[in-house]
Image: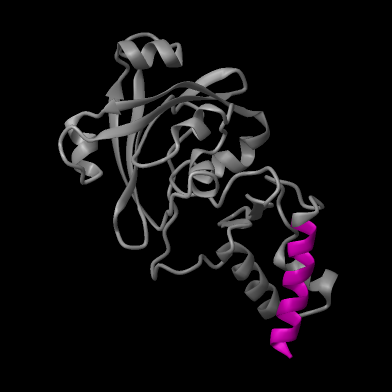
Amino acid sequence: MKQTLNLQVFDDLFNKIKTNYYALGEKLPTESEMQKIYGVSRAPIRQALGRLQSEGLIERRPGIGSVVINNGLSGPWPSMGGFSSNFSKKWNQLRCKTIDVSKVIAEEDVTKSLELEAETPTIKVIRIRIDNNVPTFLLIHHYVDVDIEKIKNAGEILHMRQFASEVLGVEFAYVTEEIAAVQADEQTSYYLEVEKGFPLLQIKRISFDSDYKPVEYVKYFVRSEDWPYKIMYSKDGGEMDL
């Protein structure tokens, strides 16, 4: 019986998210409110919310509640990384500009991270993510063995990981990130419209497929005044009890 109730709640919430009844960035009713809406106990509600979270549709945040982060229509892919909470809040005001797509011989760090032989060419993509008309992210991607023409013809690519997965056929299973505080150099200051020496966050991200083969190298720079890097952990590595 609990499974039946769990599925009833899940199906209703799933359909409401998919039909934009609950929009991107919107908070779902609280567990107490859902008990009244569905006439069930808290257990099946938590099971339904857990499944929605595992499928990447919601994010459960302590002190806030369950927030829609993906509806499979035009919103973000299931979020990864320390900026996911801001993406769900600001998704409708973001746009992205592709600056360059080219085949290059990458520097040693890229070649080593992607486990390539020296002088192996990669596809390099430079993009700027703009938040409410302010250039905020400078993103430099490297891929191997992808169709460069598909990238050139794509126009604005707001979420590169989603594009790489669905259009380029890149499999993502694991991600590592390294974070450093840096000062803007000539290139980053130009693209992000800040003074040289301006403090930025630098994140180096390497993505792997299910066989632990590196498939993407990204180095990106962030004006973090309004974009704090934030990760939430639980003691046992499981879901947070909201």
Q: How is the image coloured?
A: one colour
Q: Can residue 118 be seen? A: yes
Q: Is residue 199 left or right of residue 98?
A: left
Q: Is residue 23 left or right of residue 127?
A: right
- In the rendered image, residue 13 lying in the magenta stretch gets the answer yes
Q: State which region is magenta.
A: 1-17
Q: Position of residue 132 (x, y in %)?
A: 62, 22
Residue beneath the point at 51% across and 19% down: 135
In front of the other: 170 or 79? 170
Task: Answer above or below: position of 150 versus 62.
Answer: above
Q: Residue 1 lies in what quarter of the image?
A: bottom right
- Point out residue 184 in the picture as x, y percentages from the top left corner: 32, 17
- As for residue 149 lying within the magenta part, the answer is no
Q: Position of residue 142 (x, y in %)?
A: 35, 35
- On the picture, is 56 further left or further right than 120? right
Image quadrant where one finds the C terminus:
bottom right
